[in-house]
Amino acid sequence: MGRYVARRLLQMLPVIIGTTFLVFALVTAMGGDPVQNLYGERPVPEGIRAALTAQYHLDDPLPIRYGYYLAGLVQGDFGTSLSGSRPISEMIADAWPETLRIAGIAFAFEMVIGVAAGVMAGMRRGKFLDNLVLLSTLTVIAIPIFVLGQVSQIFLGVKAGIFPVSGTNEGFYSYLLPGLVLGSVSLAYIARLARASVAENLRMDYVRTAKAKGLSPSRITGIHVLRNSLIPVVTYLGADLGSLMGGAIVTERIFNIPGVGYNLFKAIQIEDGPALVGFVTLLVVVYVVMALVVDLLYAVLDPRIRYA
Amino acid sequence: MRDATKTSVAPGSADEATAEPAAPAAPVRDAAKPRSLLQDAVRDLVRKPLFLVSSGIILVLVVMAAFPTLFASADPQLCELGRSLQKPSADAWFGYDARGCDVYARTIHGARTSITVGVLATLGSAVIALLLGLISGFYGRWIDAVISRGIDIVMGIPFLVGAIVILNSFRDEDGFRIGGIWGVLTALTVLGWMSMARIMRSTAMQTKQSDYVTAARSLGASTGRLMFRHVLPNALTPLIVLATISLGVIISAEATLSFLGVGIQEPTISWGVMINQSLGRIRESLHPLLFPAGFVSITVLAFIMLGDAVRDALDPKLR
Amino acid sequence: MTTMEKTANVPAPRSDEDYQGPLLEVRDLHVEFHTREGVAKAVNGVNYTVDAGETLAVLGESGSGKSVTAQAIMGILDMPPGRIPQGEILFRGQDMLTMPENERRKIRGRKVAMIFQDALSSLNPVLTVGYQLGEMFRAHLGMSKKDAKLKAIELMDRVRIPAAKERVNDYPHQFSGGMRQRIMIAMALALEPDLIIADEPTTALDVTVQAQVMDLLAELQREYNMGLILITHDLGVVADVADKIAVMYAGRIVETAPVHELYSRPSHPYTRGLLDSIPRLDQKGQELYAIKGLPPNLTRIPAGCAFNPRCPKAQDICATDIPLLHPVTERDGTDLPGRGSACHFWKETIHG
């Protein structure tokens, strides 16, 4: 197991480097003059231009600039944002807790409701509850999340006044609606996955054996079927947690939550290359680490999988 | 203990129930000819309401995209502020939006952009996925390692971030963003192929190890023949299913990019553009949002249902 | 666990202690499956009995209904699509088909147990074998987890799995095919049932292991004086173990006989065909016999005798009249106990 983790960690490196380099290159290709962008229409003083060019190695070719970035990254230095000149690590430290709050709510929501709905639907395939779950999950999947977010903001927030409309001034409560919106799509996928998994496992030979052993239906489904059915669901949940923690551009923008996604979008809009690359690096690391966690989780849940 | 028991294990699986006792050359007395899996699937599909409804919707949408004037006589670009935000009426079934444009006409005309983008982007990513997945799964070794890491890398980029960055790099000489349809197409294609490639790769790997491929190989079939005659047709089903489903997702993504202000913009009409425009006045009136959003949802739904129906029909295990 | 299972702890009322009849009696059993292709008639009037300590081998090709009959006895048929339109399954004189489900569940696993063909897929992949063995004691007798595990080790020892104590926490995939089948046997044996149904218990195993597993099963059966229904398509397996044989074809029993008589003098053309298709050392070099054609589609069983399209002796009557299971006698009319043949021309077949 230890050796497997070590090998996987080594495999992660090229992915992290490759992805950040790709984004780095794309940001560079975004074109424009980053220094000029800071000053808008005004002329840039020559001295400042020279200083910024030197500070960000703007004259060097792309791979070398990326090299500098990487070197800084290894020392924990994400660089400095072009606008406002804040250390990017500081921006991340501000933004991430915000994202984690909605991610946590979304995750709890999809885990509890999604798994329960999916398992019940899978056990009663073809019955009313099953069709209800199928239909409602499909509907949720079919509605673009920004429509869902906007509409629920208007109706539940503005018109009904049940939830705060936007911002983070009301503590936990301000994160509730964004969290539910964010979790709704994954919830639908999880419910469908759990349903399919339970339905498939109910047809397995070992269920027949369990019946032949004279076990009660509750024991057959509760222990035999569920243990097997939840393996893919739990791994999906793990992967989803990874993407939730990466922030949600759309949701955070609609509800004005200054999380990772919000910052990402702002960085793109004002063409703040270093900040954009910094936040993407964070996302990639989270994503890759979660992928590893999911793999290990698989081995814990399914004894047939052993990593050497 | 095969056939009859199977019937009980896999209820209603037609080919299993009959194939084992009677197949492949059924006794002379058997009137019914043995059917191929595909025939079985097709026969199954046309009986399924899910399939009929979803393919019916898709057909209507495609005709709408091809000949919008058949459905709407009003000019989608004719806007009169005087009728701003008027409610649906006999004149304008879906009412007028904030600028006084006919929502019905615009929704119909918007189908063309949205569906074209969806179909082309899906085709593009499916082709990339097919080639890379097939090569990766078939050759294995270092080729597989390189391609797989490549997939990991592109997958590591969050979809929206990647799309926005790509769209931002489409510029004219003066540095203005010219995203438009081509930019959106590029972004959606470049960022949409990875999961299809993974599926393609794993099915190619599985198929490669199956006995009939080994048999073909031992009979001296060339690599190209093995890949395209034996592995490809078998690995294709999951790809097609996934592509159908992701078509809906891509149409929804197109709308999201418009919402974020980086996708297709006026004067091109797309559902995303319409939704984005309607959001500014959403507190006053809902119908300019409801209709294009409803069309996006119905389209997404239709493609997902179609994908589901096709998978159910082609995968006897799931029945 | 439900309270019902807890009460199973109390010994079941043995009001049938002085019950004298056969252990298991299947009477005119019919099973059909409703599929999209129509109604598949898997079992069409099967009768057989098994006594304590007796081994009945049920022989037949795929689709003959032998496994479906067994699953009907166990009550593990999926219904729907399965349906039992008529028939009785009497266990110690009580019809299990009319019993309430919770009564029946007490018999299942405890009085009647089943061994499946493919132990790998029949065991739960994510639970340890110790758990799955111990579950019998926990669910039926309400034993504690710890005691159940000790019992599981004991059971594994009894089916001669080496190092049982160390391996009790292993998962099914960590065992070899033969060992897994021993675990299945141990599971069936756990509560010392009166009857065990073994559905092709050795088909998935290597030939050398087959013999070991079969011997073990036979030995344990003798030790506990259990009834055994051995379902197989392999005539070789049957000969050493079984007391009597029932040959099934298209959901019916076409011939019954004590084991050695069946081999020496089959009285049904189908049985003869099966016997002739066994490769024999003394006929080296000759072409191997094969029954022509294929078993019938169960949704369209031929009229008359189901075997008639494939039968070398078929005549006009065979396509119209369904032959009943005639008692088979010697040429002079002397009774041959336990023998029967569902062939219009059984006399010609056995004596001709």
Image (tube, rainbow, N blue to C red):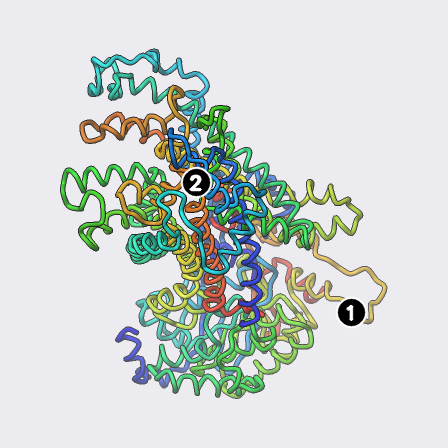
Furthest residue toward front: A47
Looking at the picture, does residue B88 appear above or below residue A191? above
**Furthest residue in direction right, as rendered:** C285
- Relative placement, left or right, of B309 versus C269 is left
Q: To which chain does the residue with label 2 belong?
A: A
Closer mark to the observer between disc 1 and disc 2: 2
- Residue at the location (64% across, 45% down)? B134
Q: Please state if A101 lies on the left or on the right of B115 as rendered.
A: left
Q: Which of B101 and A194 is in front in this view?
A: B101
Residue identifier under label 1: C280
Q: Mark 1 lies on which chain?
A: C
Q: How far apart are marks 1 and 2 (CA)?
A: 99 Å
Q: Is residue C303 visible?
A: no
Looking at the picture, which amino acid does disc 2 mark? Ile
Name the side, left or right, on which C348 lies relative to A152: right
Give the residue at mark 2: A48
Tell me where residue C236 sits by quadrant: bottom right
Q: Position of residue C313 (x, y in %)?
A: 69, 55
Residue A59 visible in the current orientation: yes
Name the one closer to the observer, A18 or C335: A18
Q: Which residue is drawn at 23% across and 14% down?
A: B81
User: Mark 1, residues whose alpha carbon is within 10 Å: few (<14), some, or many (≥20)?
Assistant: few
Question: The N terminus of chain C appears in which quarter of the rendering?
Answer: bottom left
How crowded pointer 2 is (Cα within 10 Å; few <14, some 14-19, many 20+) is rated as: few
Q: Do labels 1 and 2 share a chain?
A: no
Q: Which amino acid does label 1 sit on?
A: Arg
**Left or right of A299, for residue C204:** right
The image position of residue B52, as x and y in percent, is 42, 32
Regarding mark 1 in the picture, which secondary structure is present there?
Answer: loop
